[in-house]
Amino acid sequence: MDFESEPEMGHAPPWPFDTFTLSDGRSFQLADSVARSRCLDGHSLYTSRASLGSDSVVVKWCWSKTRMHAVRIIETAVSSAKARGDLWIVDHLPHIIWYEERRVSHQEYEREHGGSRTLQLLVEEELRPLTELTDAEELGHAFLGIFRCCRWLYERCRLMHRNINLCNLMYRRIDGKVHGVLAGFDLAVVLNEHSYEPHSENPLAFVACDLVDPSPLFPVDQYLYRFDLESLFYALALAICHYEHGMLIPPEKQPFKCWHRLEPTRLFPEKICFFFDSLRRWKPTPQFSSLYWLVVYLRALFKHGLSARDDFRYRKEAETGVASDDGFDGDTLGGHVTFDAFEAVFLTRLPPSKSEYGRASAEP
């Protein structure tokens, strides 16, 4: 798979063998390549493909004194969905095949946690990256499904993902229909459990403008749900402009290529320019041309919201002598960036739907 950004690759498995036996007696065979990323609690999270019997799966493991964060988040969401009768949401979340904790003796544990030797092991269904999709209609509706998942998680579970990027946007097929899947919950926060500070370890290309600004006039003191919406918007823009036939196009043709290498001091003006400059500086690849206006109209939500905030600050300064955000709805940029506004754009600007992609009666 050719992702826009990846965790560190090339790490050795945390045990001196490539086959591991689960507590139920099943064994999986690890793939050669192991990726390492960072969990919410600061511990290293390792990920690898594996074979479990005849099935291809994804295995994640870490050492932590608390239950693996992503497992708890997903289990809570699935339980809530079943209790509410919102079973459609399960199609947009990763499926946990197995989870266990055990004590294992290995020097890597001591390096990670100063003697803590509790291995937390998660086996998930292997999903396909959204960037493999080549049909504009399927891609657009996969993004709609992921957006609805984000909305449901926030409104029903008070959960924000905080790590939306192309590596964590996947899909599965059920009866031939594509379902977008939101994965990578290792940095997610539940509002009543954390201070949900604005810090984000998401690749900067997908981080909201307010969090990239190196010298903000009014620093952000908490993470907002519109930051997840902005990350999802960037992922959509990059997916339709950088991919064709399931592969990245040549770097010289990628309009947002510089976003992956710029420091915040240069990336922030690039993103502002994207919102306010001419639309002609970017265009989707030919197979995704029908999604152009979807991106344009979503882009307008942020453009109008950022403009409204600037206008509010200027008026405050003219009236009081001091620029201020006091009284402005920063959570939604003056009511411009909301779940309802996002949904309305998706429903009016997606390509004409085939019957199987119409809104499912079980969905909101």
Image (cartoon, helix red, strand yellow):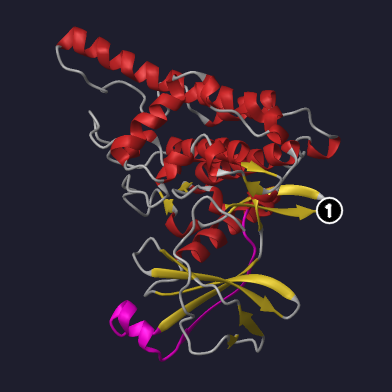
Identify the residue at image location x=41%, y=31%.
271
Among all residues in the image, which is located at the extreme left? 321
Q: Quadrant of residue 149?
A: top right
Position in image of residue 258 (x %, y %): 43, 40
Magenta stretch encompasses residue 176: no
Position in image of residue 175 (x %, y %): 83, 53
The quadrant in which the C terminus is found is top right
Magenta stretch encompasses residue 106: yes
- Name the kind of residue labelled 1 in the image: Asp
In depth, the one of 67 and 321 nearer the eye is 321
Q: Secondary structure at mark 1?
A: loop
- The part of the chain drawn in magenta is 93-117
Q: Is residue 95 visible?
A: yes
In depth, the one of 83 and 192 nearer the eye is 192
Identify the residue at image location x=46%, y=61%.
7
Q: Quadrant of residue 23?
A: bottom right
The reply, left or right, for residue 290 in relation to residue 73 is: right
- Check the image and report above or below for 262 versus 172: above
Identify the residue at image location x=53%, y=43%.
251
Q: Is residue 335 visible?
A: no
* Mark 1 Cα-neighbour bin, 10 Å: few <14, some 14–19, many ≥20: few
Name the residue beneath numbered marker 1.
Answer: 175
The reply, left or right, for residue 66 in relation to residue 50 is: left
Position in image of residue 222 (x %, y %): 32, 41
- Check the image and report above or below for 195 versus 234: below
- Check the image and report above or below for 68 versus 269: below
The quadrant in which the N terminus is found is bottom right
Q: Quadrant of residue 43?
A: bottom left
